[in-house]
Image: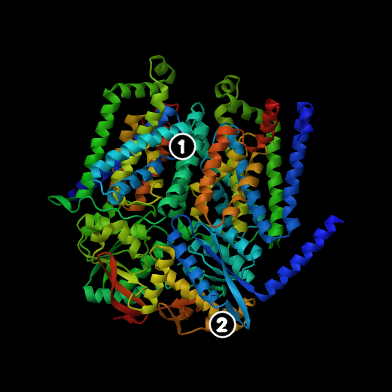
């Protein structure tokens, strides 16, 4: 029994890390730009295809591919901000609807480009790590490791750099931030780029585990939504808490009850939070 | 349009809407001119699209958006189909029951959620649409599971079954007219004034004594009720429903119809459906491109024509005048 | 005056066109398949099967039925795997294009949704949809030219249980009616073969993480994992993740040709030694030739269901010839039912299904058990509904 508990704990943390990477990027983009980005899942998908292209087409090492994915995603984010989102800065509803359109363009563009079939992604590592009875697939350990590194890097960037302070000021209050010399024309595209890069890296990290196809963006997007609803929109600590909670709940209910129970429990939790504290666990009341 | 631009603005608006009404009436008659069963089918789909989008428009009038609209169409569809097939109720009982039940579900959901401001509500409706699909899949004895319910009986009125597409079309057209009449009445009445006050400036509306949360919930209930009403007709016309039919994409398609047509105009849902529902037929064999076109049209309309296609004639004459 | 001249000229032209049409008749076949979204690889496989069959018929001047040569034209519409879209496309095919024959649909929901239209209009459909409800005595115009799990599971399971000495089996199924039905059938089949389905898990269709479920299954020490009832992508993920957590037993898929997709998702290493159902034996010359023609023409690997629909479309043409009409679908339907021992590219084909569905509109074809080696199927046993050897 204790074996199953420990195993579920590890599985839950791995899932939680994935959800966290998705949700942080999503909530960051909302915090900075006030845009609910429905195309967030498609950037996960694009990240996975970037990894595929880097590893199998170009034959690059995985680490280099990940770095390239980040660079490409930041540039893509800046482009998307300029072309699609910039006109809707003051209009949350229109920006959100535009992101629905963007999601359709990206997903179907990938369909035309790569075809509907899932693509083969070579395993980066194989075998398992054993600690007594505990089993951790090496592929998952690798994903977890890189994911944690990426998240720590993001944390340092946000908390201990000038750029990060600017971003946080923007999330707090745009006008005040502008008064204190935060340059919006640079911060908006970079902020969106950073959020998108987190989704793309998540996609690139998960590609060896969960495969690559044009349709893989939908599930992580939904998870990001649930995390953000639970944690409170725009709240990064809330997202961190909710992502881990969600990962653990899914893992434990799947292991001890059943897989379909996991989804029902998750949604029951969403409903409960909405009824008791509709702004989320750490939300600010008004989003 | 050239002769109307010289007349005074109010009169022009009157003439314009008269002309628009004439155009719509003529378009509504097209299937009888061509006599093609397929054109009747497309016309029915246009009516159903317009009707559902009209429900969404009601919600848009208070400055909100529901991404669970497809799920409410589904709730109405299942309500009516289950009443008709399991309890042997007549369709004419199931149809209003579908609207009432969808509205009731919306009321229960909207009451706590619409206390929240801004896009939070939209975010949650997205999750709710998914919840609907999961719950329906969880109870296959009710929903038919992923295989759905097939062989749904055709629409029948007082024992008279609407067998042909042309008969269904007349019925759907009348129902659409009724829905549009309801919307028109709401807009002209005190409720409509509350709606637009809430849409324009929430804080101002609040301070002038309008119960904003309740007003928004009212719009959500009416809009979702119309969605359920549409769902009932759709289910009995198509003859097949499954939880997947009412997935997120359906909600998105209604959003696109509404936004492209015009979010705040009464005619928005009509124009949007007339333009977008027949569009796939030109690209029937390559839907990827069609979805990309939808996405591009959506973004372009939002950017350059935020009031939708209904505002196009006004925009055009405005551009022409500024060009002179 | 002028307009009258134009009118006269137009009517002359119309007359000429009418004459030309009389000499060369066209037979329109609808292909109502999934061309976008997740079902597109199956849909393209079916569409191309119809196109290749039409190409054969047109090669010598057209399909000759009762002395008239018909040029076969395939009209393809996409249903995006959705019931509503399928109904619109079916309306267009039946009432606008006036087709009498439809190759499609791919999905179960779309075929159930279009049957009220096609059956009433007497339009013959050849569907891939796996649902048992697609075929029934009151749907006389629907045929299924490919075997489903119900036809192939038992003989394969008998052979595998005996040859691999399997006692306990674990399985994962999607949490819906199809998944539950297959779980029941497969469970009964293993029991009959002398093994036991000891661990069964159900999950939501869009799930991608199976480690918690597999952990539980593997912890019960099963000899084999069964993948039937799962989509190719899901099956691939299960294979990969089962090997990831160190499962070393047998992995079996007793239904649905999808080996290529599974290998794509899980990789060659994880799929090595897996047992799969296969309808395709490269040692059969005609089958190999069809596969080559397909990939030469379209530059893509052949979808496993495509040969069935190539044979199905050709059987349909044969039925039109036998019935001596392309208009009277009731006669063509009866002629199609009467075809037996048809030599298709996959082998000898017959209709079956009277007991299971109440109507013998289900294809019976030879099939095989294959072992996956280096990403390719290697046939290890040949089967009929009577058994494998």
Point out which mark residue B123 bears: 1
The single residue placed furthest to the top in the displayed view is A179
The single residue placed furthest to the right in the displayed view is C1
Q: Position of residue C389 (x, y in %)?
A: 28, 81
The secondary structure type at the circle numbered 1 is helix
Q: Quadrant of the N terminus of chain C?
A: bottom right
Vertical position of residue B266 compared to residue C218: above or below: above
The secondary structure type at the circle numbered 2 is helix
Q: Nearer the viewer, residue C48 or C199?
A: C48
Q: Is residue A141 visible?
A: yes
Residue drawn 43% across and 72% down? C307
Q: Is residue A232 visible?
A: no
Question: Residue beneath label 2, please?
Answer: C335
Q: Position of residue C185 (x, y in %)?
A: 37, 70
Side (left or right) of A131 relative to A275: left
The single residue placed furthest to the left in the displayed view is A132
Vertical position of residue B33 compared to residue A32: above or below: below
Mark 2 crowdedness (10 Å alpha carbons): few <14, some 14-19, many ≥20: some
Q: Are marks 2 and 1 in contact (CB under 8 Å)?
A: no
Chain letter for mark 1: B
Chain letter for mark 2: C
Q: Position of residue A174 (x, y in %)?
A: 43, 20
Q: Nearer the viewer, residue C193 or C278?
A: C278
Residue drawn 84% across and 59% down? C4
The image quarter containing residue A244 is: top left
Mark 1 crowdedness (10 Å alpha carbons): few <14, some 14-19, many ≥20: many
- Nearer to us of marks 2 and 1 is 2
């Amino acid at each position: 029994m204790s074996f199953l508990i420990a195993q579920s704990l590890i599985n839950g943390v791995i899932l939680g890390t994935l959800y966290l990477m998705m949700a942080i990027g999503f909530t960051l983009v909302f915090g900075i730009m006030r845009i609910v980005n429905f195309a967030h899942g498609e950037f996960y998908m694009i990240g996975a295809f970037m990894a595929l292209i880097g590893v199998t087409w170009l034959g690059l090492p995985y680490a280099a591919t990940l770095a390239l994915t980040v660079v490409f995603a930041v540039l893509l984010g800046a482009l998307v901000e300029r072309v699609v989102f910039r006109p809707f800065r003051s209009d949350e509803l229109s920006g959100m609807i535009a992101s629905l359109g963007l999601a359709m363009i990206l997903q179907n563009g990938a369909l035309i480009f790569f075809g509907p079939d899932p693509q083969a992604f070579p395993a980066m590592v194989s075998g398992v790590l054993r600690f007594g009875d505990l089993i951790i697939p090496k592929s998952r350990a690798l994903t977890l490791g890189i994911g944690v590194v990426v998240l720590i890097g993001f944390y340092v960037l946000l908390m201990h750099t000038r750029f990060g302070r600017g971003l946080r000021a923007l999330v707090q209050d745009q006008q005040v931030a502008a008064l204190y010399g935060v340059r919006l024309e640079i911060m908006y595209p970079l902020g969106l780029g950073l959020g998108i890069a987190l989704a793309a890296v998540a996609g690139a990290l998960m590609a060896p585990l969960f495969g690559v196809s044009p349709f893989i963006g939908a599930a992580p997007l939904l998870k990001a939504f649930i995390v953000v609803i639970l944690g409170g929109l725009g709240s990064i600590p809330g997202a961190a808490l909710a992502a881990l909670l969600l990962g653990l709940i899914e893992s434990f209910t799947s292991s001890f009850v059943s897989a379909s129970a996991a989804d029902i429990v998750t949604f029951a939790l969403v409903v409960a939070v909405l009824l008791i504290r509709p702004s989320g666990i750490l939300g600010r009341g008004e989003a | 349009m050239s002769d109307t631009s010289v007349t005074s603005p109010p009169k022009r608006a009157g003439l314009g809407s008269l002309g628009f009404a004439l155009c719509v009436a003529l378009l509504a008659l097209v299937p009888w001119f061509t006599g093609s069963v397929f054109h009747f089918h497309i016309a029915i789909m246009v009516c159903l699209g317009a009707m559902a989008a009209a429900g969404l428009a009601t919600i848009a009038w208070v400055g909100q958006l529901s991404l669970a609209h497809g799920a409410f169409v589904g709730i109405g569809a299942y309500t009516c189909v289950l009443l008709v097939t399991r309890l042997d109720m007549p369709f004419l009982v199931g149809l209003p029951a579908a609207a009432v039940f969808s509205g009731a579900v919306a009321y229960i959901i909207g009451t706590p959620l619409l206390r929240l401001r801004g896009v939070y509500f939209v975010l949650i409706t997205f999750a709710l649409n998914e919840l609907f699909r999961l719950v329906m899949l969880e109870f296959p004895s009710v929903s038919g599971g992923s295989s759905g319910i097939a062989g749904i009986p055709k629409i029948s009125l007082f024992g008279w079954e609407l067998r042909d597409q042309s008969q269904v079309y007349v019925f759907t057209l009348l129902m659409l007219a009724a829905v549009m009449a309801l919307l028109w009445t709401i807009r002209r009445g005190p409720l409509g004034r509350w709606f637009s006050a809430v849409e324009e400036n929430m804080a101002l509306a609040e301070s002038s004594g309008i119960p904003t949360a309740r007003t928004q919930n009212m719009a959500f209930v009416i809009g979702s009720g119309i969605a359920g009403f549409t769902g009932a007709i759709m289910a009995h016309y198509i003859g097949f429903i499954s939880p997947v039919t009412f997935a997120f994409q359906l909600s998105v398609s209604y959003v696109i119809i509404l936004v492209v047509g015009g979010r705040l105009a009464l005619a928005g849902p009509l124009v949007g459906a007339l333009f977008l529902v027949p569009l796939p037929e030109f690209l029937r064999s390559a839907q990827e491109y069609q979805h990309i076109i939808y996405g591009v049209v959506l973004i372009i309309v939002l950017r350059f024509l935020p009031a939708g296609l209904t505002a196009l004639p006004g925009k055009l004459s405005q551009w022409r005048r500024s060009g002179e | 005056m002028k307009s009258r001249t134009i009118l006269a000229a137009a009517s002359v032209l119309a007359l000429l066109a009418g004459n030309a049409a009389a000499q060369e008749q066209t037979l329109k076949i609808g292909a109502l398949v999934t061309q976008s979204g997740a079902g597109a690889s199956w849909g393209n496989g079916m569409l191309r099967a119809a196109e290749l069959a039409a190409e054969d018929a047109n090669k010598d001047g057209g399909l000759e039925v009762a002395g008239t040569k018909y040029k076969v034209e395939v009209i393809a519409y996409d249903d995006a795997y959705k019931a509503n879209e399928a109904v619109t496309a079916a309306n267009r095919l039946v009432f606008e294009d006036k087709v009498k024959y439809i190759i499609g649909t791919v999905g179960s929901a779309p075929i159930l949704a279009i049957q009220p239209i096609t059956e009433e209009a007497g339009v013959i459909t050849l569907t891939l949809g796996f649902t048992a409800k697609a075929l029934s005595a009151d749907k006389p115009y629907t045929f299924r030219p490919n075997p489903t799990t119900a036809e192939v599971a038992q003989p394969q399971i008998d052979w595998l249980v005996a040859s691999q000495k399997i006692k306990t089996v674990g399985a994962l199924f999607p949490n819906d009616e199809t998944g539950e039905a297959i779980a029941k059938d497969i469970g009964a089949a293993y029991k009959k073969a002398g093994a036991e389905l000891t661990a069964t898990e159900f999950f939501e269709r869009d799930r991608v993480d199976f480690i918690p479920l597999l952990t539980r299954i593997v912890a019960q020490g099963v000899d084999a994992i069964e993948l039937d009832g799962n989509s190719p992508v899901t099956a691939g993920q299960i294979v990969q993740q089962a090997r990831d957590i160190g499962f070393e037993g047998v992995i079996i898929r007793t239904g649905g040709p999808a080996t290529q997709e599974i290998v794509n998702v899980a990789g060659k290493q994880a799929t090595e030694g897996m047992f799969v159902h296969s309808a395709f034996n490269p040692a059969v010359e005609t089958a190999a030739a069809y596969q080559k023609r397909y990939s030469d023409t379209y530059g893509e690997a052949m979808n496993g269901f495509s040969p069935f629909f190539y044979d199905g479309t050709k059987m349909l043409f044969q039925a039109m010839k036998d019935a001596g009409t392309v208009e009277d679908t009731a006669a063509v339907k009866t002629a199609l039912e009467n075809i037996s021992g048809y030599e298709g590219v996959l082998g000898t084909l017959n209709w079956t299904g009277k007991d299971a569905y109440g109507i013998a509109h289900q294809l019976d074809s030879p099939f095989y058990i294959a072992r996956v080696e280096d990403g390719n199927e290697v046939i290890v046993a040949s089967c009929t509904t009577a058994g494998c050897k």
